């Protein structure tokens, strides 16, 4: 069964290690002006991931300072390759795109699913356009793997929101918002019954892989 926000929707979000070398005396040489390949990794406080989708590439910078546990949870899923082959099962123009939990429109991915995490919305980022956040049920501390990317500023999702908690944003898209906009414009299936949300894509965009940079 697909879980939702308590407001009718639930959703879903690299760094550099600098070094300088000094030559031994008596020979004096200038410090290198370029970093070795392994030093080009992102700052542990701002790790980046590349999300390859069926509609293009999205680069996301996470914020391990403002949402440390949420960032670690997401990266744990990335390291285990949990997101590979999952889909964006919810697309809502003027709101967000949500994915990372279903392999098709009726089957949730359970193998590798971890325990829910604590909601860090009090210290997390604001839900502005381009941020990635944790999807959850109406229970504040129920987020697991699913995430959403805001396609507009969604201030109503910020702490304390409508339920005293809100939704924890923990990173932002730094490359590929055009891809996000393509995903949210995906054709949707008409609702089959009154009150059903108009959010199910006809051909769900696929998350091919998510890898840390």
Image (cartoon, grey):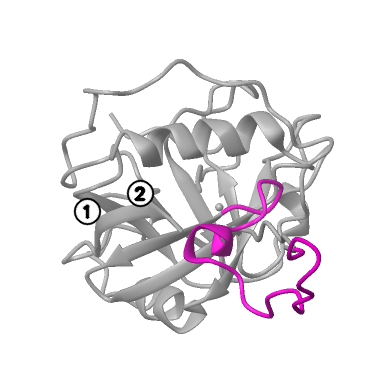
Q: How many marks?
A: 2
Work out whether residue 176 can be spotted: yes
Magenta stretch? 22-47
Asked whether the beta carbons under mark 1 and mark 2 sit within 8 Å of each other, the answer is yes
Q: x, y percentage for residue 69?
A: 65, 28
Instruction: Please rate how many residues cluster around mark 1, counting C-alpha atoms within 10 Å: few if below 14, some from 14 to 19, many from 20.
Output: few
Q: x, y percentage for residue 128?
A: 71, 64
Which residue is pictured at 50% across the width and 46% down the height?
A: 11
Judged from the image, the secondary structure of the residue bearing numbered disc 2 is: loop
Work out whether residue 6 can be spotted: no
Query: In the current view of this chain or complex, which residue is farthest to the top?
Result: 115
For residue 34, the mark is none
Q: From this view, report whether residue 176 is shown above or below residue 100.
A: below
Residue position marked by numbered label 2 in the rendering: 196
113 and 14: which one is in front? Answer: 14
Give the Cα distance between marks 1 and 2.
Answer: 7 Å
* Image quarter hosting the N terminus: top left
Which residue is pictured at 23% across the width and 47% down the height?
A: 84
Assess whether residue 24 is covered by the magenta stretch.
yes
Q: From this view, report whether residue 124 is shown above or below residue 116.
A: below
Residue position marked by numbered label 1 in the rendering: 192
72 and 105: which one is in front? Answer: 72
Q: x, y percentage for residue 211?
A: 37, 53
Assess whether residue 38 is covered by the magenta stretch.
yes
Which residue is pictured at 78% across the width and 55% down the height?
A: 126
């Amino acid at each position: 069964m697909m879980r939702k926000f308590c407001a009718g929707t639930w959703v879903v979000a690299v760094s550099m290690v600098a070094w300088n070398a000094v030559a031994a005396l008596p020979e004096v040489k200038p410090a290198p002006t370029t970093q070795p390949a392994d030093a080009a990794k992102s700052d542990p406080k701002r790790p980046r991931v590349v999300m390859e989708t069926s509609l293009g590439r999205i680069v996301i910078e996470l914020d391990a300072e403002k949402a440390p546990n949420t960032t670690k949870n997401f990266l744990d899923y990335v390291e285990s390759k949990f997101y590979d082959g999952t889909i964006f099962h919810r697309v809502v123009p003027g709101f967000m795109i949500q994915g990372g939990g279903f392999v098709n429109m009726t089957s949730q991915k359970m193998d590798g699913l971890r325990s829910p995490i604590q909601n860090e919305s009090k210290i997390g980022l604001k839900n502005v356009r381009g941020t990635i956040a944790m999807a959850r049920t109406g229970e504040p501390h129920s987020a697991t793997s699913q995430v959403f990317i805001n396609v507009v500023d969604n201030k109503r999702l910020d702490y304390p929101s409508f339920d005293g908690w809100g939704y924890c944003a923990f990173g932002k898209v730094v490359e590929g918002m055009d891809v996000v906009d393509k995903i949210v414009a995906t054709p949707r299936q008409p609702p089959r019954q009154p009150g059903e949300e108009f959010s199910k894509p006809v051909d769900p965009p696929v998350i091919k892989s998510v890898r840390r940079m």
